Image: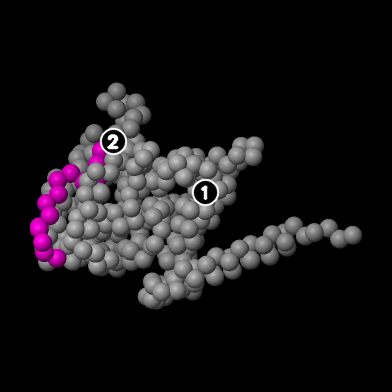
């Protein structure tokens, strides 16, 4: 694979984004797949976004990056727990779509992180990390980038929310606003490959709906979806992604500044309100025939 640095425009955008709390995510990172049986915990997904942010414009460099434990321990976990999350990033295998040496479509598997050095027994110590060669090479050849809000990711409580947020942020930057994903493909992108997620009702209830609710509540995106059926079976999902403007953006910003206590109740109220609005609109569009 050809090695190259990110376009200079993206380097500048990355530096600028750090000042506003945003993280620039390459398209190929958004399009990572978790093979069956592999996924990241919520804490590991948040740490992933933090270290991508820390690496910034140097994400493709063959070098070690450094970050203080105190900077990533926003959840105030003990040092041992934090080290376990770092190990999780090291042992989790990801798959990336690539071209083989023969030019054919192929999948390359690798871990996210390569070498990691953890200073022992001190919160004031450093974590030194290096992305795997596969990860660096793929990112270096990225042509599309998305911007996500770091605080929104850290505020999320659903395991699958950070990954769906990254995917939707990428889609929001394109001309189209509807994208269809095979159901198995979407599960793989979110790391929702457990046997308990194989039935559509379970995937919808425990992964898709909660993640979309959090994205709509905490970010500058508006996300919805339409199930695609083959017969009576749901086989794909059409994601509908747009950007918020004006008051809607301010509402999301206020929620991020609000206390965490009661957030789920506030989100539930918002989801119920949207559902009621949809029913009202559907009734207007399809009025019941009068006798």
Kind of element beneath mark 1 = helix
234 left or right, relative to 25: right
Which residue is nearer to you in this view: 107 or 25?
A: 107
Residue under label 1: 202
Work out how far the residue at label 2 is from the one at label 1, CA to CA, in angstroms.
Answer: 28 Å
Assess whether residue 171 is covered by the magenta stretch: no
Quadrant for the C terminus in the image: bottom right
Which range is magenta? 110-123
- Neighbour class for label 1 at 10 Å: few (<14), some, many (≥20)? few
| Residue at (21% x, 49% y) in the render | 87
Image spot of residue 28 (x, y percent) = 33, 44
Kind of element beneath mark 2 = strand
278 left or right, relative to 204: right
Image spot of residue 168 (x, y percent) = 43, 53
Which mark, residue 222? Answer: none
215 left or right, relative to 14: right
Image spot of residue 82 (x, y percent) = 22, 58
Number of on-image labels: 2
Quadrant for the N terminus in the image: top left
Residue under label 2: 109
Asked if one can make out residue 28 in the rendered structure from this viewpoint, the answer is yes
| Residue at (55% x, 48% y) in the render | 201
- Neighbour class for label 2 at 10 Å: few (<14), some, many (≥20)? some
168 left or right, relative to 112: right
| Residue at (26% x, 25% y) in the render | 101
Residue situated furthest right in the rendering: 291
> Residue 33's image quarter?
top left
Assess whether residue 115 is covered by the magenta stretch: yes
> Residue 121's image quarter?
bottom left
């Amino acid at each position: 694979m050809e090695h190259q640095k990110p376009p200079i425009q993206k380097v500048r955008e990355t530096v600028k984004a750090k000042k506003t709390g945003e993280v620039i995510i390459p398209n190929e990172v958004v399009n990572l797949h978790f093979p069956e049986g592999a996924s990241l915990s919520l804490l590991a997904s948040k740490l992933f976004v933090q270290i991508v942010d820390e690496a910034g414009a140097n994400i493709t460099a063959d070098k070690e990056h450094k970050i203080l434990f105190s900077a990533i321990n926003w959840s105030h976990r003990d040092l041992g727990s934090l080290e376990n999350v770092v190990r999780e990033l090291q042992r989790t295998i990801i798959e990336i779509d690539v071209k083989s040496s023969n030019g054919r479509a192929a999948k390359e598997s690798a871990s996210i992180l390569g070498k990691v050095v953890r200073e022992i027994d001190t919160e004031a110590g450093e974590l030194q990390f290096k992305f795997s060669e596969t990860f660096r090479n793929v990112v270096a050849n990225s042509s599309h980038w998305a911007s996500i809000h770091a605080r929104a990711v850290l505020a999320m409580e659903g395991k699958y929310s950070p990954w769906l947020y990254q995917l939707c942020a990428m889609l929001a930057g394109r001309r189209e606003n509807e994208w269809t994903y095979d159901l198995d493909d979407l599960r793989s992108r979110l790391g929702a490959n457990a046997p308990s997620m194989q039935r559509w009702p379970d995937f919808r209830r425990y992964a898709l709906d909660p993640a979309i609710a959090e994205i709509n509540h905490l970010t500058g995106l508006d996300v919805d979806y339409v199930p695609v059926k083959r017969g009576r079976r749901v086989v794909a999902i059409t994601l509908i992604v747009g950007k918020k403007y004006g008051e809607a953006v301010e509402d999301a910003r206020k929620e991020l500044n609000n206390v965490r206590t009661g957030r789920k109740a506030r989100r539930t109220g918002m989801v119920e309100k949207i559902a009621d609005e949809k029913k009202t609109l559907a009734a207007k569009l399809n009025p019941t025939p009068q006798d």
